Image (cartoon, grey):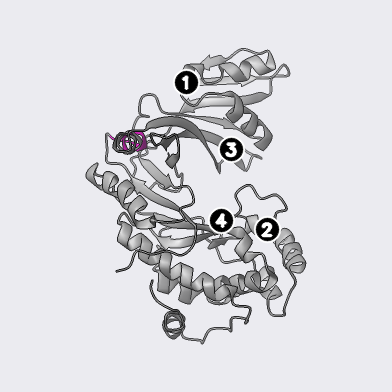
Amino acid sequence: MTHALRRRTGFEIELLAPEGSSRRTLADEIALRRNGIVRPVWHHDSEPSLVPGLGRFLHLTQGFEVLDAEGRSVCTLVDDITIVADLDQRARPAAGWYRVLTDDARLLQLIAATADPADPVEKSLDPVATLWGARVQRHGEYFKVDDASGATIAIAAPLGGGRERPCEIVTPPLSTHHYVALDELLSAARELGFTVPTEAALHLHYDGELFRPAGALANLIRLFGWWREPLRQLLHTNPACVRLAPLPAGLVAAVDASPTYEQLRDVARSSGLSKFFDVNLTQLFLANPVRDTLEVRILPGAIDADDIVRQAQLVEALLLRCQDPTPISRPPASVGDAAHMLLAALKPPW
């Protein structure tokens, strides 16, 4: 097969380390192969809260960026809290692994900028305590910092049993030699015994500016809204993958006409759009996007570069059709017929 991809693409590949290993193990191996180094980093995420009245906790977990011999980023390896089915959640936390929790996004950003992810848990909140003129309180294996009124600013706690094993490989945007770059990372993972977890997905990131023209954006919504089930069949979406959902009904209804970008933006802002849909459009509607990409989230997990590049080529072809200003039509009633129609309409290779 050809390994050519025409677009700048970022990859997020979800894997699972074998028992007794971790994402740090893979980071060290990749760094060794590139004569590089591993730099601890914070990974931002959120999780449901068991505290009444508090919908979620925001947290920082330990991730690892691999830099090559010239100091360029090769990839970053982070946790993914959706990976749970293959873990023994009754297991004791692994030594040295922890997370930092808070309940305010601004506090999380401040903590991430202040605390050092390379520090052990007992020292992790020292810089935060200094900022508030407070002291770190220890409660068994937990550490916390309160402000002068007694309100908790942050808690550092052991990472749940097995949570060092999930490993999402996040690449920088790759412009050329996609297969070579992925094969280097994934061959190392396979040799270390990494596998594809039950809930795994592959996420692809494409330059957001390509999809801001109203015609391209409306076609994106038509493709992932009207053609949702045929698309998931064609791409073999993992039914165990969570944090996926159909696009908001109001946003999909808006493309029945020929909406302007501004009209779609206004509907998106009022529709509850977030990143946790089949396709993440959120950055396309921001004046100053944090990461200016379109993210396709419905591809199944894989640990082979051939499989991943083939899937990426198919998505590329679909996105190229979206950039054609001709509106995408509605699918036929049969999901199977619609999936075949999608494939037949695309130009190889994929």
The disc, 1 or 2, on the residue closer to the chain's N-terminal end is: 1
The disc, 1 or 3, on the residue closer to the chain's N-terminal end is: 3
Please, what is the three-letter code of the amino acid marked with disc 4? Phe
Q: Quarter of the image holding residue 194?
A: top left
Please, what is the three-letter code of the amino acid marked with disc 2? Gly
Q: Could you say which is closer to the camera, residue 252 or residue 319?
A: 319
Residue 46 pos. (x, y %): 56, 42
**Residue 326 placement, left or right of 19:** right
> To which residue does mark 3 refer?
57
Q: Quarter of the image holding residue 35?
A: top left
Residue 149 pos. (x, y %): 73, 19
Please, what is the three-letter code of the amino acid marked with disc 3? Phe
Please, what is the three-letter code of the amino acid marked with disc 1? Asp
Does the magenta-highlighted stretch encompass residue 219?
no
Q: What is the magenta range?
A: 21-26
> To which residue does mark 1 refer?
119
Question: Element at badge 3?
Answer: strand
